Image (cartoon, rainbow, N blue to C red):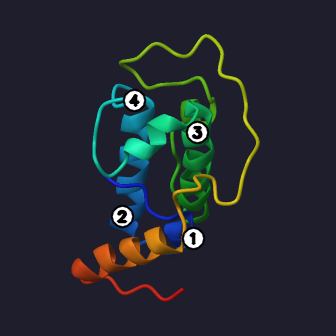
Amino acid sequence: MRLWHEKLISKLPRAQLLGQHREVAALRGKGWDKKHATVDYVFTHSPYKLYQFHLLVMAEMQVRGYHPDPKWFDPTYRGLHCPAYLALAPCPLTDPIYPEHDQQYLAECLENLRSKGIQILI
């Protein structure tokens, strides 16, 4: 499980973009606060940050003609198997959304994609 650096979202191949949607949806649901070395940093921030990141992913999906379930556009929604948050305070949108998504993380993501045979130029 990985959140791609947000600079890569618009450049991801179809499979990685749709996979990112599934992974973010899982993290917003039952995956929230479940330890995973690659995404543990997400749990040190408000779940609203993950919602903000998910909006980026879903916007790119829409640009490409996909139709994510409208329920995911509600920040309190957590999927079919988790109750919605009763309240989720908005937090400011930062750039990047996650401070962990720095230049080093971008390089790690690019290398990960290269190892899968995917070359992306930034």
Nearer to the camera, 92 or 22: 92
Q: Which residue is mark 1?
A: 7
The tag on residue 16 is 2
Residue at the spot x=34%, y=31% of the render?
31
Residue at the spot x=43%, y=85% of the render?
120
Q: CA distance from mark 1 to mark 3?
A: 17 Å
Badge 2: few (under 14), some or many (20 or more) residues near its Cα, within 10 Å?
Answer: some
Q: CA distance from mark 2 to mark 1?
A: 14 Å
Question: Depth-wise, is mark 2 or mark 1 nearer the camera?
Answer: 1
Q: Are marks 2 and 3 in contact (CB under 8 Å)?
A: no
Give above or below for 19 relative to 25. Answer: below
Q: CA distance from mark 4 to mark 2?
A: 21 Å
The tag on residue 40 is none
Q: Position of residue 118 (x, y in %)?
A: 32, 82
Q: Quadrant of residue 85?
A: top right
Badge 2 or badge 3: first in the primary sequence: 2
Q: Which residue is mark 4?
A: 32
Q: CA distance from mark 4 to mark 3?
A: 12 Å
Residue 115 horizontal side relative to residue 17, left or right:
left
Q: Position of residue 6 (x, y in %)?
A: 55, 63
Type of amino acid at the residue the image marks with label 1: Lys
The kind of secondary structure element at disc 3 is helix
The kind of secondary structure element at disc 4 is loop
Residue at the spot x=39%, y=71% of the render?
109
The kind of secondary structure element at disc 2 is helix
Q: Which residue is mark 3?
A: 51
Badge 1 or badge 3: first in the primary sequence: 1
